[in-house]
Image: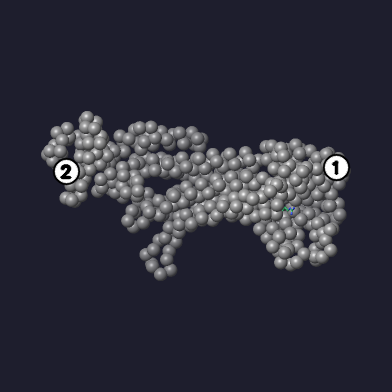
Amino acid sequence: MVEKLWGGRFEASLNKQTEEFGASIKFEQRLAPFDLQGSLAHVKMLGETGIISADEAGKIADGLTEVEQKLMSGQIEFKIENEDIHMNMESYLHDEIGSMAGKLHTARSRNDQVATDMHLYLKSVLTEVLSVLTELRQTIVNLAVNHVDTVMPGYTHLQHAQPISFGQHLMAYYQMFTRDFERFEFNVKHTDMNPLGAAALAGTTFPIDRVLTTQLLGFDKVYTNSMDAVSDRDFILEFLSNSSLLMMHLSRLCEEILLWCSHEFQFVTLSDAYSTGSSIMPQKKNPDMAELIRGKTGRVYGNLMGLLTVMKGLPLAYNKDLQEDKEGMFDSSDTILTALSVMTGMLSTMTVNDVNMESATQKDFSNATELADYLATKGIPFREAHEIVGKLVLDCTKKGIYLQDVSLQDYQKLSTLIEQDVYEVLKSRTAVARRTSLGGTAFDSVKSQIEQAKKELQI
Ligand code: ARG
């Protein structure tokens, strides 16, 4: 049996099931490098402040480096009996340097230690998230550059509404992902903070130097209050919440891609590399990846709800409930990182069927607003113009024709204000080109949105 590091006040050993239930090592092994990093900074500080001798600090640091090397070369076996990452690492340190390993935990608790590990871990994840999110935003901008001139139906209520540029559609997603980027950037502010030195909850009687560990660990600042330091999980909740919004955006885009690659739309064709087949229907090419990103949104929302619920009734300071912060955070970070890169790959390899997109704007009434606007420009109150065009649409529907098929003679019966130039106005390309209001879908407006985005991305 492995002796517990906290075994002093106990007479009997832990029940096997209890041991398994309480152990976090099963799911937190990925914290090992961060735990060692935290320990190295801590021991350096203990040496510098004279809390332990320089010689002892040096030996412990060497021992930790040995453990680190063993970790890298896969020689570390994590043990349930050692409960968590902290005690697993300490026990390996003990194997390296014997009882001097016991000095490492001076002026420290697992409570500030685990918080430190989580801050270090999330900080590194956030760096990665910001970088893959930038790649996705770049991919969207590149696609938009190629499709400023691609005309497609714009939808409201999933009904043809007004023609738009595909570039405009894509740049809407650029804006969403840019807000996500900004949220994750802000998340760094609350993650780049050092809880080490808060000890169990109240600080310590040892003359520690928290500013030094903050520098050594590369944190931007130090937690001001020791109780806040060990019980704060806001930085994780912000991450889970930001991840949820991000997945919601990815999922909406997936939903559109799924529609677009259906037989009914045929607006895009996904690359084979991002599609799968059916075991029974030979013709199938399924957009599994888009469905899966949409599906995985559920677990990311779940992870947020899970931790919010864990936190809601917790008294200060550390409670074992906090151990439940890990699996959700790991799961959400793995999920969003993969979802982001799959989405980037899917978008950069898909074929846009611009001819199909534009022809979908030919046989529809998405130019009805153009006609109403045309009449309004000629002085007819817009409400009246709307009524006239509405009736005309109804009439056309009955005849099976479209607004561009109505003869000039018939138009003039409706209003003498209508002239030959109406046919130009009714073209979907004209409809797009004329929406020049700020942020509108006009080709030039999309181009200037792209220019702005390129500045933001420095490309
Ligand atoms: N595995 C624990 C966690 O994840 C580490 C902290 C344990 N602290 C304690 N006092 N039991 O939260």
x 62%, y 44%: residue: 235
In which quadrant will I find the N terminus? Answer: bottom right
Using the rendered image of the protein, determine whether residue 137 is visible from the camera's viewpoint: no
On the image, the x and y values in percent for residue 44 come to: 80, 43
On the image, the x and y values in percent for residue 173 come to: 44, 43
Furthest residue toward bottom: 280
x 54%, y 56%: residue: 299
Q: Is mark 2 within 8 Å of ligand 1?
A: no
x 24%, y 39%: residue: 386
Closer to us: 110 or 212: 110
| Mark sitting earlier along the chain (1/2) | 1
**At numbered mark 2, what does the secondary structure look like: helix, strand or loop?**
loop
x 35%, y 49%: residue: 158
Closer to us: 362 or 396: 396
Label 2, on which residue? 406
Type of amino acid under label 2: Val
| Quadrant housing residue 4 | bottom right
> For mark 1, does the 10 Å Cα neighbourhood hold few (<14), some (14 to 19), or many (20 or more) residues?
some
Label 1, on which residue? 51
What's the image's color scheme? one colour
On the image, the x and y values in percent for residue 232 come to: 67, 45
- The answer to whether 271 appears left or right of 222 in the picture is left
Closer to us: 140 or 361: 361
**At numbered mark 1, what does the secondary structure look like: helix, strand or loop?**
loop
Answer yes or no: do the residues labelled 1 and 2 have beta carbons within 8 Å?
no
Using the rendered image of the protein, determine whether residue 295 is visible from the camera's viewpoint: yes
Type of amino acid under label 1: Ile
On the image, the x and y values in percent for residue 370 come to: 26, 38
Q: Is residue 339 above or below residue 277?
A: above
Rounded to the nearest whole Å, what is the CA distance between mark 1 and mark 2? 91 Å
> For mark 2, does the 10 Å Cα neighbourhood hold few (<14), some (14 to 19), or many (20 or more) residues?
few
